[in-house]
Amino acid sequence: MNTIIELEHIWADYGKRNVLKDISLTVAEHDFIGVIGPNGGGKTTLMKVLLGLMKPSQGIIKYAENGHAVEQLNIGYLPQYAQIDKKFPICVEEVILSGLSRKKSLLQRYTEKDMQRVQEVIRLLGLSGLEKQPIGQLSGGQLQRAFLGRALVAEPTVIVLDEPNTYLDKEGEMQLYTLLQELNKKSAIILVSHDRTSVERYAKRIIYVSENLEIIK
């Protein structure tokens, strides 16, 4: 499989504190990488660097598509539950639709095709009937699915999920992993989780991050 992301000797700091030290990692098409490690060990920082949300203090990030170098990739991102503002006045349909906004200029309208794609994702995630529901009225599991919809509506090359199991019961967690296995046929997946047992069951590769990076599987 072609490599689509390559991190070379990445260092990342918060002030004088080194969070990531000399980390190298490759991500291939259709990879499913589980990222585990202690709290504060650098897992979320690594995801921010990979997404371009944080600039490393040292190191190089390379992206490629169909074997050719590109400036950036289409990456879908599901942040940690704690980073989601449930008081923001937006409904399920609008949350998912916002995942298409980076492909639009300020003056472009959403097309009928865009709206059809949003409805496809709503059905896929079992959110039918909740399209106009404000996110503040959703359960934890429903909210996670709405923001997962935002991450995947643009059919990304890579989907990055940061602790998606939070507030999901066992049945919801099983449904999530079943869905991710289906999405993995089209997209690479990078999943951060504290639940090592589930990650080991479903991920193709596992890395352990605690300042440095260790390949477990």
Image (cartoon, rainbow, N blue to C red):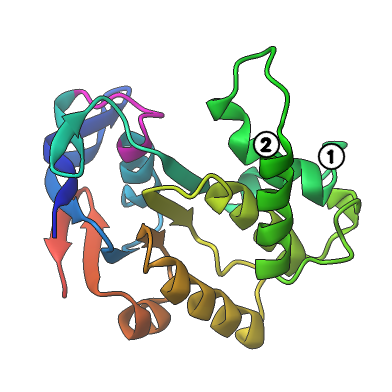
**Real-space Cα separation, disc 1 to disc 2, in angstroms:** 10 Å
Occupied quadrant, residue 56: top left
Residue 79 can be seen, yes or no: no
Q: Is residue 86 above or below residue 60?
A: below
What residue lies at 54% left-to-right and 52% top-to-bottom? Answer: 152
Q: Give the mark nearest the N terminus, 1 or 2.
A: 1
Helix, strand or loop for disc 1? loop
Instruction: State the residue position of label 2.
Output: 98
Occupied quadrant, residue 206: bottom left
Helix, strand or loop for disc 2? helix
Badge 2 amino acid = Ser
Residue range highlighted in magenta: 50-57
Occupied quadrant, residue 185: bottom left
What residue lies at 50% left-to-right and 80% top-to-bottom? Answer: 178
Q: Is residue 205 left or right of residue 14?
A: left
Locate residue 103, reporting x and y percent: 54, 28
Q: Is residue 205 above or below residue 85?
A: below
The extreme front residue here reads 112
Locate residue 151, reporting x and y percent: 55, 49
Q: Is residue 56 above or below residue 47?
A: above
Q: Is residue 208 left or right of residue 104?
A: left
- Could you say which disc has been placed on residue 90 in the image? 1
| Quadrant the C terminus occupies | bottom left
Residue 32 can be seen, yes or no: yes
| Secondary structure that dominates the magenta span | loop
**10 Å crowding of disc 1: few (<14), some (14-19), many (20+):** some
Mark 1 and mark 2 residues within 8 Å of each other at the beta carbon: yes
Residue 56 is covered by the magenta coloring:
yes
